[in-house]
Each structure stands twice: as C-alpha cells, then as structure tokens.
Image (tube, helix red, strand yellow):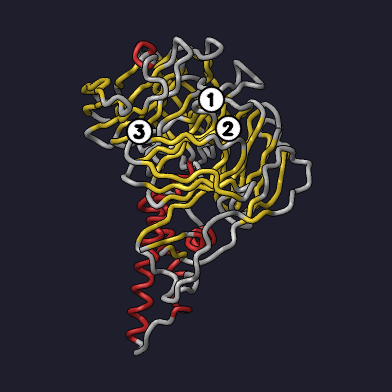
Amino acid sequence: MVRKIALILLTLLPLNISAQEAPPQLAKVDVPQPPKPSSGAFTGSKLMYTTYFYTATEAIVHGYEQDTNVRIVSLEQNRTIWTGKVGPGETQLVPTGKGVFGFLSDKKASLLVGTPSSCTIVGYWLRDEEGTHVADHFYGRIPVSSSADDRVIVWAWDDMTIQVTDVTTDKLVKEQKVKKGGYLELLKSDVAALGGHVLEFKADKKKMAVQVYFDEGFFVPGPDGRTAGRHFRTYVGNITEGVNDLNLIAYFQKAKVNVKDIKTGKSLFKGTIEPGKVKTLTLSQKYVEVTSDVEISALVAPYEHYKAGYAEHHYAAGVEGTGIETEFLLTTPDELWIFSYFDNNHVDVFDENTGKKVWSGDLKAGHVQGLQPGYGYFRVRSSAGVSVMGGDQACGAEYSPAAGLFTVDEELLKVATEILADRQEQAKKDGRKLTAAEAAAPLSADESKKAQRRIRTNLGKSMSPTEVQQRLDSMQTYD
C-alpha cells in the first residue's frame, strides 16, 4: 500500500516564457493521492521517489536497480505519458516534448533531459541514482558522435582502477589503473562506434567522475560531487566554434584562483575574482585544473566567444553546489528556467552586470517560470529551494538535479521514523497510547532542528524548517 507522510494537492503553472504575461490558471497534477493511513503519518518503510523536471524534447531514464517501476506524468496535460520498468544498465528514451513532467519511481534512477538523442551536440557530467557526480559506479547512454573532438573522460580523484564496459554489447571497452589527478579517456576513435550504447563505469573507490564532452554547456563537479568548491578538473574543447569558454564564478568572497594546463603544467590564469563576478578564459582543447582559496564554481559554456543564441542547456550550480538551492549565479545565451520544489516560494532574478531586476514573483511546488532575458550573467534568489537552467534553443542535455532530493527524502524518512519512536515513547511514559493525530502532527521546533542538522551533517545541504516540513508533507511511502 502506498502512503503519504502527509497529503498535499500539488498544482502546476503551465510554462510561461514571457515575464510580462499574466500567470495562467492552475491545473491539477496527475499524481497518486492514496488515502490517509489510519495508523498515523510515519508508517511506510520505503519511499516512493517523486519529483519533477523540465525538458526541451525528451528524457532518458537510467536504471540502477532490478525491476525499477517508473511513471512519467505530463503536468501540463494532466496525464501519464509513459510507465514501465528499467533494470541495472537499462535505459528508456521517453519522447516527452517540451514541458514540465512528474517522475515517480519505487527505486532510485537517474534522469537525462534535454535533447540527448535528437540533437547530440551536447556536454554533461554523469550523475548516479543518488544524484551525485562523484561515485564508484555510473551508467551513461552515449550520444551519437558528430565531431572530431567528441570524447568521454573518466577523472580520478584518487588512485584507482577504472573499468568501462559496453552494456549494450556486453564487451569490455577499456580497463586502466589511473593515478590521482589523472584520467582515462575514450577519444573519437573509441566513441564513434558507441553512439546510443549504454556504458557502465566502475572504480574501486568512490572518487570517480565522468565527463561526456560532445559540446560545451555544463558546470564542473569537484572531488565531493558538488559543483561549488575549491578544486576542479575538466576538459575544455573546441566544439562548435573552435574554442570554448571556461567561466569562473565567485559568490560572496573575493577568490584567489589559479588555472593550470594539466598537460604542460603552465598557469593559464592566476589572479583574483571579486564577489559576484565572473572571469572567462577562452580556450581550445585544454585539460585544466582550477584551484581557489574559497568556494567558487566553474562553468564551461559560451559567454565571451559566442555572446547570444548558442544552442545549449546547463543547470546552475548554486552557492552550495547541490543544484537545488536559494542563490545562483549563471550565464545564459538567452533563456532562464526556474523550477520551484516548495510552496510560497518568492523568487527574484537580477541582471548581475547592470543590477536591474529582471523578474520577481511567487512560485508553488511543481511550478516553473520561463524567462527570456537575453544573453548575459544573472543572479537568482529564492526563499526556498529551486533549480535554475540557462540556455537557448532545443539542443542540449543535462542530468536533472532533482534526483538529489531522493537522498534528502531518504534521510528525512529516517528522521521521521526516529521522531515517531520518540513520540510513542513519550506517550508510553505518560501512560497512554499515541494517537494517529499526534503521529501525523507537524514537526516541533526541536524536531525540525534535528532534521535540519541531519541533512546538513550527512548531505552537506541547508534546509529551512519550512522546506523540511513541506518535503515531509509531500513524501509518499509504502511497505
């Protein structure tokens, strides 16, 4: 039986590209609404992983566990568009069309969105079923090669043995021992025959990251899997203009940054970046290492060499580098998409170069606001967690950061189970039985602090009391 920790009615605002248009009417989301369990709120022992995502054209579901049941729902059309099963290494291409969609699964999976098969001039880093960029195991469906600079790079943040297997043909592609700071590489000659195939990447340490470079348009992860930090390594290629831009973004502190050519050891930039500013290096076919004395982000995307209209999409890092946060800085060649994961979420968007406010408004959980501010550099602030995508046109691919909420939900379920036990124990001490209403009651201030501490300590993510309660309210569980 599927249960919810508390019931909410989720609504969707249809995609609105113009900031000046009046908001459309709300439409009900087609998600399961099981009856409230009589035994109280915290009853299920397993999660129904539920989130939502935006895509320009399609989505590819990557399975990691046996018999993973998945349902994808069109929130704008209020209907299920695909349901099925995926297993380890299995992928399902879902031709969604442009819009916002719900994702429901009884086991964790990763989700590649954009145009990963219909327009394969794309760039991204793999995420696993936990939503992280650094692990010991990934599956990735490889685009069809169209450029001489296409490649897949497996980066090692520690000494390790890396094995790459073609799941589609069940053949070993490459196995190699790699020193810390090094990489295993599949060049054009390797990937040309792997288009549309699923590759499995394995390492003997959880310090591996996989870069799929078929174009620019991605934030770079550091050694802990976050896209904000003090240390990054990435390839900056030459698709499609012969050069790419490496953009270094400082958030709240002045950053002392060094960019080194990994192959030659030569410093490509050494200097400071002021808070809120971006430093751009236009490079071609460079393997670079970025170090900083404070946390920054590194973005490989067109900004100086191609100032508008470049077809790509990239999810913003956020100041904590988790991708679902309340403060973002990012470039875009034309458009912004802002997705809210929480209700009563006030959002402000600023042109960081001029200081002008581009848009301001309130979003609910499951709502997306599309903007077309044009080429530039922008700051997005919100009162609760959002994710932000920059880009233009229907060509690009990225793994949705929404999978990062799966680990949050797992942690919250553990905390909720402990809180239920504490409430039952207190009722027992009082000589009575805990009622269903008491079990389903919202978290107290102390209980909320406990949940916040757990999320911060175990996941490195900040959540407000409101975010914690809303996520608990939306979680579905089953036995």
Question: In what quadrant of the picture does the N terminus appear?
Answer: bottom left
For marks 3 and 1, give the one nearer the viewer. Answer: 1
Q: Which residue is mark 1?
A: 118
In terms of sequence position, does the residue under pointer 3 or pointer 1 come before the other? 1
Amino acid at dot 2? Thr
Q: Is residue 472 above or below residue 160?
A: below
Is residue 247 visible from the viewing direction of this image? no
Image position, residue 104 (x, y; %) = 47, 50
Q: Residue at x 31, y 31 (%)?
A: 208
Which element type, helix, strand or loop, lies under badge 1? loop
Image position, residue 154 (x, y; %) = 33, 25
**As rendered, which of 24 and 359 lies closer to the eye?**
24
Separation of residues labelled 2 and 1 (CA atoms): 8 Å
Q: Residue at x 54, y 39 (%)?
A: 252
Q: Quadrant of residue 295?
A: top left
Amino acid at dot 3? Tyr
Question: In what quadrant of the picture does the C terminus appear?
Answer: bottom left
**As rendered, which of 161 and 307 lies closer to the eye?**
161
Q: Which residue is mark 2?
A: 57
Q: Residue at x 59, y 51 (%)?
A: 366
318 displayed left or right of 381: left
The single residue placed furthest to the bottom in the displayed view is 431
